[in-house]
Image (cartoon, grey):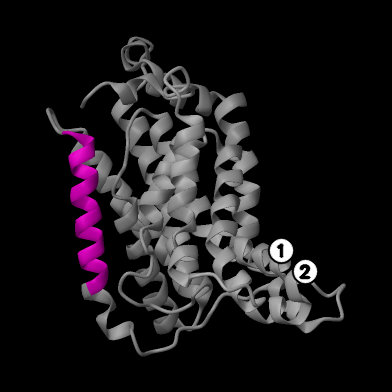
Amino acid sequence: MSDTAQALGLWGVPVAMLGGMIRASTPYLFVSLGETLTEKSGRVNLGLEGTLLMGAVSAYGAAYSTGSAWLGVLAAAGCGVVLGALHALLCARPRVNHIAVGIALMLFGTGLSFYLGKPLIQPQAPQLPALALGDFSDIPAVRDALRVNPLFILGVVLAPLLAWLLKSTRVGLVLRLVGENVDAARALGYPDNRIRLYATMAGGMLSGIGGSFLSLVYPGVWSEGLSSGQGLIAVALVIFARWTPMACLYASLLYGAAGSMGGALQSAGVSVSHHLLSGAPAALTLLIMLFTCSPDRAAQGQPRELSVGS
C-alpha cells in the first residue's frame, strides 16, 4: 500500500486506500453480516470479538498443522459454529440475559485464543492465495494494491445473497417473524429457540471466517490482540446499517478505507500525526452516530424483540 502511494504521489493515495479498503474491510464485513443474521432472530451476540479471535487462532493452527490454508478457513468456520451454538444454548435458559452471556463469551474466547495461540506466535502458516486484478497496469505498486483475496469476494457475494434470503424466502420470513414477534411465531408453531440457535450458529460461522482472514491474509500472522476490537466495531456497524446486509457491505468498505487512510497519506509525504490518523475509524464511528442516530430513526429497521430485555 505504501509503495503505491510512493510510486504515484498524491494520486497514489486513493489507489492505496482502495487496496487498504479491500484488505481491512473483510473482517468487518463477515462479522457484521453474521451479527445481522443473529439479530434478525431477535438476539444480540456481543461475544463476536472472542469468536473473531478464536477463528483467527484456529485457522492459523489448522493451516500450520495441515499445510492447507483452506482447511484453516474450515476450522475457523467450525469454531465459530461451536461458539455460536454455546451462546444460543445458554441464552435459551430461563432468566438468562443475552447481553451478559455475550460479554462472558467475548472474554472467554479472547482468553482462550491467547492461551492456545502462544505456540503459534513464531511458526509461519501457509497463507490464502490472492487474485491479481491489477494486471491492466504496468506499475508494480498498483498491481500489488489490487491483489484481491477470495474471502473478500465471498463476502461481497454473500451480502446480496443474505439480503435476498431475508426478504424473499420462507426461511427469511420465519427468521424475521421470530425477531419481530416471538409470540406470533410460537402461535404458528415455529420453534423460536431452535431458529435462534441456527441463526446464531450461522452468525458465529461467518465471524469465524472473518477471523481466518486476519491470520491467513492480512496481516497474515497470529499475535495477541490481532483483531484490535474489530469484532465489537462490526457489531456496532449492524446498527449503523439498520440491520441490512447491503448496508453492512457499504459500511465495512467505508471503515476499511478509513483505516488505511493514515498509511496512504504518510507514504505520499503528507505530514500528519500517525496517532491522529489511526483514530480515523473511531472518529468515523462518532460521526455516523451523530448523523444517523436521531431520535426518530434510532430504531428504524431494528427487530422488535431486541428491545425486550431477556
- How far from the left and from the top, in percent, is residue 13? 69, 68
- The magenta stretch is 97-114
Q: Amino acid at mark 2?
A: Trp
Q: Main secondary structure of the magenta part?
A: helix
Of residues 47 and 191, the one drawn nearer to the viewer in this rendering: 47
Query: Which residue is denoted by mark 1 in the rendering?
Result: 14
Q: Is residue 156 above or below residue 299?
A: below
Q: Is residue 57 visible?
A: yes
Considering every residue shown, the one lying at the far left of the view is 95
Of residues 87 and 227, the one drawn nearer to the viewer in this rendering: 227
- Tag 2 secondary structure: helix
- Residue at 36% x, 41% y: name it: 200
Total labels: the figure holds: 2
Q: Quadrant of the C terminus?
A: top left
232 sits left or right of 242 in the view: left
Q: Is residue 145 above or below residue 304?
A: below
* Image marks 1 and 2: residues in contact by CB distance under 8 Å: yes
Q: Is residue 106 magenta?
A: yes
Query: Which residue is denoted by mark 2 in the rendering?
Result: 11
- Residue at 18% x, 50% y: name it: 104
